[in-house]
Image (cartoon, grey):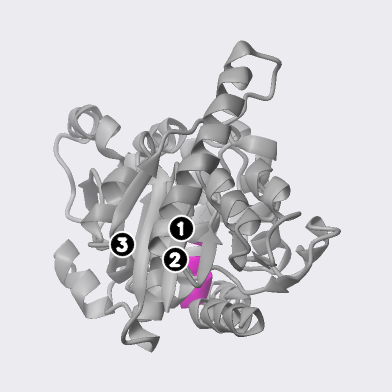
Amino acid sequence: MRIVLSGGGTGGHIYPAVAVARQLEAEEKHTEILYIGGTRGLESKLVPQEKIPFKAIDITGFRRKLSLDNVKTIVRFLKGVKSSKEMLREFKPDVVIGTGGYVCGPVVYAASKLGIPTLIHEQNAIPGLTNKFLSRYADTVAVSFAGTESSFPGSKRVIYTGNPRATTVTKANPQRGYASLGISEGSTVVLVVGGSRGAKAINNAMIEMAPFVGKGNGVHYVYVTGEPYFEETRKVLRQKLGGLPNGLHVLPYIHNMPEVLACTSLIVNRAGASFLAEITALGIPSILIPSPNVTNNHQEANARQLEGEGAAVVILEKDLSGKALHGAIQSIIGDENLRQRMSQSSLRLGKRDSAGVITNELRRLISNKK
């Protein structure tokens, strides 16, 4: 099987594509993969690290206000379509997959014009602009949240698959997670993370509540600041506390996140779709603080899906404080019955076989083409 993957800009678009790649490699011995991403996106760094062949096109996204930059974007899109067609003709894929971000626009569009079967995957409860555009051309639209199929009216085929990152984390080893953190197995771990680069509002709340954590009650707080905030945050915490208590672990970044998630009892984080797929696959209760700085406020829509099923507590950033965050954490950690109910609700929302559902759909598309 020959597959082209495309998606980028953020890890939320890249990691689902990588998850599909790994599933295909596990299922099909002779799978060949090419990833087409952007020259400026995070995928240009992450994908080569995954040892996946990578080629790039130069493309930017549209601004929502009238702008001369949008004219330049249209020109780049047309050039991107031309470049994509050349790459696709050379690689001769059986199917092309887009996982969101503006870079997959010209790639999936070019594939549809060449008659190559296409699938696009939407991670969020509210579809992104690129996927809304591509849904008119793709053979299959895959959605991550059950009940959001209606967001793509007029599409040829829309199916609920979940997010393939869910499949990745189910294979993670919790013992390795504990060991990497230097925490005894079976300990209660509260993971606080604001995304790959951190979130200033969550950092400020965590600094405010820091005097109340790590008090020897058996709970370990693993606090991931994000690289840009790490040095300053650690300095402030040490000044505020006179040193870091044993129960507070401050890190700039976690490279083995699936393993750490596997040993987590409660998570505080943003509401990016891939992260939510991971925590529901593992049944982790969550306190979600949606980023207000995203298109169409889609993170709040994502978070409300979990809240509505009893799997999460939502705190909007405008209501966030150290006191509010500490109170929410204590209400869950201090009530084992509540935590178990939230865990069960979270697990019911998880789509653990997501990657396999997508690869089965890819085979169907290829078979229909023959």
Which label's residue is closer to the chain start, 2 or 3?
A: 2
Q: Is residue 364 above or below residue 131?
A: below
Distance of mark 3 from mark 1, alpha carbons? 37 Å
- Closest to the observer: 59 or 115? 115
**What amino acid is found at the position of numbered circle 1 in the picture?**
Arg
- Closest to the observer: 209 or 157? 157
The part of the image, by quadrant, that contains residue 178 is bottom left
Residue under label 3, please give it: 257
**Side of 88 where 143 appears, left or right:** right
Distance of mark 2 from mark 3, alpha carbons? 35 Å
How busy is the neighbourhood of tag 1: few (under 14 within 10 Å), some, or many (20 plus)?
Answer: few
| Residue drawn at 58 percent across, 36 percent down | 317
Q: Is residue 247 above or below residue 202?
A: below
Residues at discs 2 and 1 in contact (Cβ within 8 Å): yes
Q: Does the magenta run of residues contain 36? A: no
**What amino acid is found at the position of numbered circle 3 in the picture?**
Met
Question: What residue range appears in magenta?
Answer: 275-284
Tell me the element at label 3. Answer: helix
Q: Where does the image place residue 200, in percent across and percent down from the top left?
A: 41, 31
**What amino acid is found at the position of numbered circle 2 in the picture?**
Lys
Q: Is residue 342 above or below residue 77?
A: below
